[in-house]
C-alpha cells in the first residue's frame, strides 16, 4: 500500500502553524542561496504562497510559478499574490506540468519529505531547470529533532499516540539530500544548516496552533480526555516562560543546492 498522502487544505491555519516558521527559515535560506535577480523560478509545493511571496519580494524575479497539489492552498496563494507577481497551478511534484529547461531555479521549501517519491521530485526539478540553473531545497531536520513541534511529537509518542510521519521522512536527513541531489546528476552540491527561533505570546497560543497540524490534529483529536490533559501538562512543563509569559522555541532545517550540468 502506498504511504498516506499528507496535504494542507487550510491556507489560513497553515499560515499560523507553519507559514511563519517557513519565512523565518526562508530568510536564512535565501541569504545563503544568494540568487541573482531576473531568474525564472518554480516553487514546488508552494502551499499557501508564504515562501513564494518571499521570492517575489526579495529576489527580483523575472517570473515565479507556484505548484501545489491542494486546490485550497492554491486558491489562498492566488489571493495572497496577484497574477502579475506570481502564477499558481495545481500540480504534482513528481510530474511537474512544465517543459524541460523552462526555469532558472527550482526550489522546495519545507516540502521534500511530504513527497511520496523524493528522488523523482528532485529529478523533476532538475528536468525543468536550464543547464547551469539551480535546484535547491530546505526541510526541517525531523529525525534530528529539528521540527518546530518536535516536543509535542515526543510527548505524544510517550502516550502511544505517535503522529503520522511524512512518507519520505528520510529525505529530511542531510546525507539523504546529498544522495538525492547526486542521484539527479546535479553538480556543485553544497549544504547548509538553518537554525531559527519563534516566540509565542504564551503556552496556550502555542498549544492552539501546534495541534492544528495535519500530521498531529487527527491523533490529538482521537486521544481520550485524560490523555489529552496529560499531554498538555507534560508539554507545558518542558517550556520556560519569560517574565511576560512568552515562550521561545527553536527549530533546525537542512538546506541543499546544486546545479544542472551544462
Image (spheres, helix red, strand yellow):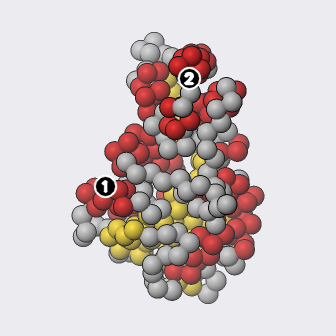
Q: Quadrant of the C terminus?
A: bottom right
Taking depth in this image into account, of 256 and 42 the one nearest to the observer is 42
The quarter of the picture where residue 102 lies is: bottom left
Q: Is residue 167 above or below residue 233?
A: below
| Residue 71 visible in the snapshot | yes
> What residue is at 54 percent from the left and 31 percent from the top?
222
Taking depth in this image into account, of 254 and 60 the one nearest to the observer is 254
Label 2 residue SS = loop
The quarter of the picture where residue 55 lies is: bottom left
> What residue is at 67 percent from the left and 39 percent from the top?
145
Q: How far apart in space, not on screen, are marks 1 and 2 (Cα)?
A: 34 Å
Taking depth in this image into account, of 3 and 8 the one nearest to the observer is 3
| Residue 193 visible in the snapshot | no
Q: Is residue 12 above or below residue 83?
A: above
Mark 1: give few (<14), some (14-19) or many (20+) Cα within 10 Å: some
Label 1 residue SS = helix
Question: Disc 2 designates what residue?
Answer: 224
> What residue is at 49 percent from the left and 23 percent from the top?
247
Question: Disc 1 designates what residue?
Answer: 76
Q: Quadrant of the N terminus?
A: bottom right
Mark 2: give few (<14), some (14-19) or many (20+) Cα within 10 Å: few
Q: Position of residue 77 (x, y in %)?
A: 32, 58
> What residue is at 69 percent from the left and 30 percent from the top?
160
Whether residue 185 sits left or right of residue 134 in the image: it is: right
Whether residue 163 sits left or right of residue 10 in the image: it is: right
Q: Position of residue 221 (x, y in %)?
A: 50, 31
Q: Are marks 1 and 2 in contact (CB under 8 Å)?
A: no
Taking depth in this image into account, of 184 and 33 the one nearest to the observer is 184
Q: Is residue 99 above or below residue 235?
A: below
Q: Position of residue 63 (x, y in %)?
A: 35, 74
- Of badges 1 and 2, nearer the viewer stands 2
Amino acid at each position: 500500500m502506498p504511504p498516506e498522502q499528507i496535504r494542507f487544505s487550510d491556507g489560513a491555519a497553515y499560515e499560523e502553524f507553519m507559514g511563519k516558521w517557513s519565512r523565518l527559515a526562508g530568510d536564512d535560506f535565501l541569504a545563503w542561496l544568494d540568487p541573482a535577480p531576473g531568474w525564472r523560478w518554480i516553487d514546488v509545493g508552494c502551499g499557501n504562497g508564504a515562501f513564494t511571496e518571499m521570492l517575489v519580494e526579495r529576489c527580483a524575479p523575472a517570473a515565479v510559478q507556484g505548484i501545489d497539489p491542494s486546490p485550497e492552498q492554491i486558491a489562498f496563494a492566488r489571493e495572497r499574490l496577484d497574477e502579475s507577481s506570481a502564477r499558481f497551478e495545481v500540480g504534482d511534484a513528481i510530474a511537474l506540468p512544465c517543459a524541460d529547461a523552462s526555469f532558472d531555479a527550482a526550489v522546495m521549501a519545507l516540502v521534500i519529505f511530504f513527497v511520496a517519491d523524493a528522488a523523482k521530485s528532485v529529478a523533476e526539478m532538475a528536468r525543468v531547470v536550464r543547464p547551469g540553473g539551480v535546484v535547491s531545497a530546505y526541510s526541517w531536520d525531523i529525525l534530528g529533532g529539528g521540527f518546530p513541534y518536535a516536543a509535542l511529537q515526543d510527548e505524544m509518542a510517550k502516550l502511544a499516540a505517535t503522529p503520522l510521519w511524512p512518507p519520505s521522512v528520510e529525505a529530511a536527513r542531510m546525507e539523504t539530500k546529498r544522495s538525492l541531489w547526486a542521484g539527479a546528476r546535479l553538480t556543485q552540491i553544497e549544504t547548509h544548516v538553518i537554525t531559527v527561533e519563534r516566540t509565542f505570546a504564551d503556552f496556550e497560543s502555542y498549544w492552539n496552533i501546534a495541534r492544528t497540524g495535519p500530521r498531529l490534529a487527527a491523533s490529538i483529536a482521537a486521544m481520550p480526555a485524560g490523555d489529552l490533559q496529560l499531554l498538555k501538562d507534560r508539554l507545558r512543563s518542558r517550556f520556560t516562560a519569560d517574565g511576560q509569559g512568552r515562550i521561545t522555541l527553536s527549530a533546525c532545517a537542512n538546506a541543499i543546492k546544486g546545479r544542472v550540468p551544462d
